[in-house]
Amino acid sequence: MIRRVPWGFLVFVAALGVPALGSRFYTFLANDVVIWTLFATSLNLLVGYTGLVSFGHAAYLGVGAYATGILMKKLGVPFLFAWPAAGVFAGACALVFGFFCVRLTRIYFAMLTLAFAQIVWAICFKWNELTGGEQGMPEIPYPDFGWIERLGARLSFFEWRTAEYYYFLTVVLVAFCLWALRRIVHSPFGRMLTTIRENAERAEFIGVNVRRYELVAFVLAGAFAGLAGGLFGIFNRGVFPDFAYWTKSSEVLIMTLLGGMNTFYGPGIGALVLILLNQQIVSYTEYWPLVLGTVLVVLLFGFPGGIAGAAGALSGRLLRRTRGA
Amino acid sequence: MPDPSFVFAQSLSGLTAAMFLFLIASGLSLIFGVLRVLNFAHGTFYMLGAYVAYQAMLWLGPGPGMFWIAALGAALTIALLGGLVERLLFRHLYGKEELYQLLFTYALGLILSDVAKIFWGTQQKSVSRPPGLTGSFSFLGATIPQYNLFVILLGPAIALAFWFVLQRTRVGRFIRAAALDRETLGALGTNVDALYTGVFMLASFLGGLGGALVSPMRATVPGMDTEVIVEAFVVVVIGGLGSLWGTFLGALIYGQVLSFGILFFPRFSIFAVFALMAAVLIIRPWGLLGRPLR
């Protein structure tokens, strides 16, 4: 019976209800979680499902954020076109970079993704005319919510602000992306990625063009990361070179691992836990990296399956015990 | 065309930077070559070396020779710390997936750098140059600080000593054997665990020494570890992971590209360095002087 619960839908409805709690801060945190969920889930397509450890996933977040930011701020393109453009630009970037990356294996793959991400970062950092350079590009406009605001004024149950409208929009768009990613993962194509992760050599023997599959996975992961970036830039009210720096790549890897790589919703759980934990710890102590490092060491040695993996094992054990009794 | 003395000075400053990078990157490369782990925490060992040297200078006070005692003491302290880390934590990583190794060493770096922040705060620390090397002299119209010259001479000396140990001594033969085939070496009766600890300590020593020697030239600040580790990655990737002379060459190239890049294309010098790294990985993933991994 438990299997029938539509968890995805319930979480979606719960997420939409967050602004009703009335706290601007909760909405802000929830928005952060939602965007990082998409970013981490896109990485999981590579790391968890295809077995490719990318250490430069922040590059695509950065490209997406800059694409949407530049289009909306400098060229006045509406969000409706500027946001999909983030996915297109990041996907194109991933296609070029991925073409070279998938030729390498293991540690060299990780190193090349890192090198490309640092190239993106260096360009964002130095190309002042286009990207605003070191200072970044502040004051990215919000999407135009005119018609919804008029509708909201007519209904006037709650007094929503632009930040909350943006939050609703983010939840809906991310939910759509996650649905698409889930379809991809459970499609025959997604199954083939898992086959490649388990045994690339054998996949090649049965006639699979491993490199091409890996490249498609790389491009898809990059495109979805770009879409997350497009939302992230507007959410942060600006885009900065930091978005593409390698520490962002390690942050999202940690989220993915913390939540659990072998499950679809694991990275989302990781994003939620890490952001809430950060917010709690930072109010007590400035030594957040120390706490994060310790959590990570415990996780790596104690729970290699992440939170989702540990919860799955626990519920499995409980279920067996209740059946046995 | 800028005038020749300026070009000369620029290339010497690139050379100085290269020698520091070599000290750090050679440890990184050694750990990867033998232990097969890419150690993100190595940059933090470098930073700790600088902090410990600063602390030792505070205790010892000024005086002839005190800087050298402090630098050597710092490097030895970091070597001991490295030994401890290897024995207690690293040991469990060998043969695991790259992702776990990378994230573990990253976590270790986070922890250690925050511990440094607890001890030394966020204010930048600096150490004065050792007496006897405070001056500078002119050569071909360029002014060269004596300390820089000392560093430029020390780099090749350490590379040669390293080469001699690896190629001409019994311990070096064991290290090379461990890099090739750990199981066989163990089956032949060598204590591979102790050898690994020793290799890790040597690499940490080099990292700590690099940090201690850089402290009179650049301020010691939190965050210098994440910056230097990426530079060291670039160096070892260009030269070849696990190759001593490759690392040396990689450091030389990095230093020159960066210092002349700043001269001619100030906007694209960082870009050039990473583009070079990507190009090497694409054309020769095992680096200029490295050998393909099995």
Image: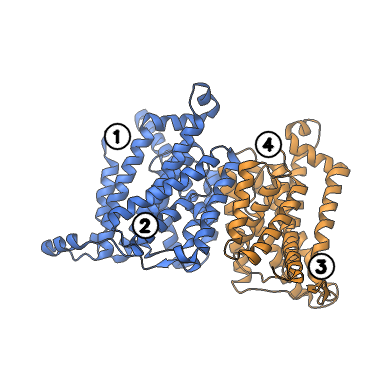
Chain A shade in the render: blue
Secondary structure category for the residue under label 2:
helix
Q: Amino acid at mark 2?
A: Thr
Query: Residue type at mark 4?
Result: Leu
Colour assigned to chain B in the rendering is orange
Color encoding of the figure:
by chain
Q: Nearer the viewer, residue A35 or B287?
A: B287
Task: Please give the residue where the numbered disc 1 appears in the rendered image.
Answer: A3
Question: In this image, B270 relative to B203: left or right?
Answer: left
Front residue (pair B203, B112): B203
Left or right of residue B53: residue B158: right
Residue underneath mark 4: B293
In primary-sequence order, the first of circles 1 and 2 is 1
Q: Nearer the viewer, residue A260 or B262?
A: B262
Give me the C-alpha separation between circle 2 and circle 3.
49 Å
Q: Are discs 1 and 2 less than 8 Å apart at CB? A: no
Dot 3 amino acid type: Leu
Contact (CB < 8 A) between labels 2 and 3? Answer: no
- Label 3 to label 1: alpha-carbon separation: 71 Å
Label 1, secondary structure: give it.
helix
Mark whose residue sits in front, 3 or 1: 3
- In which image quadrant can residue A63 be found? bottom left
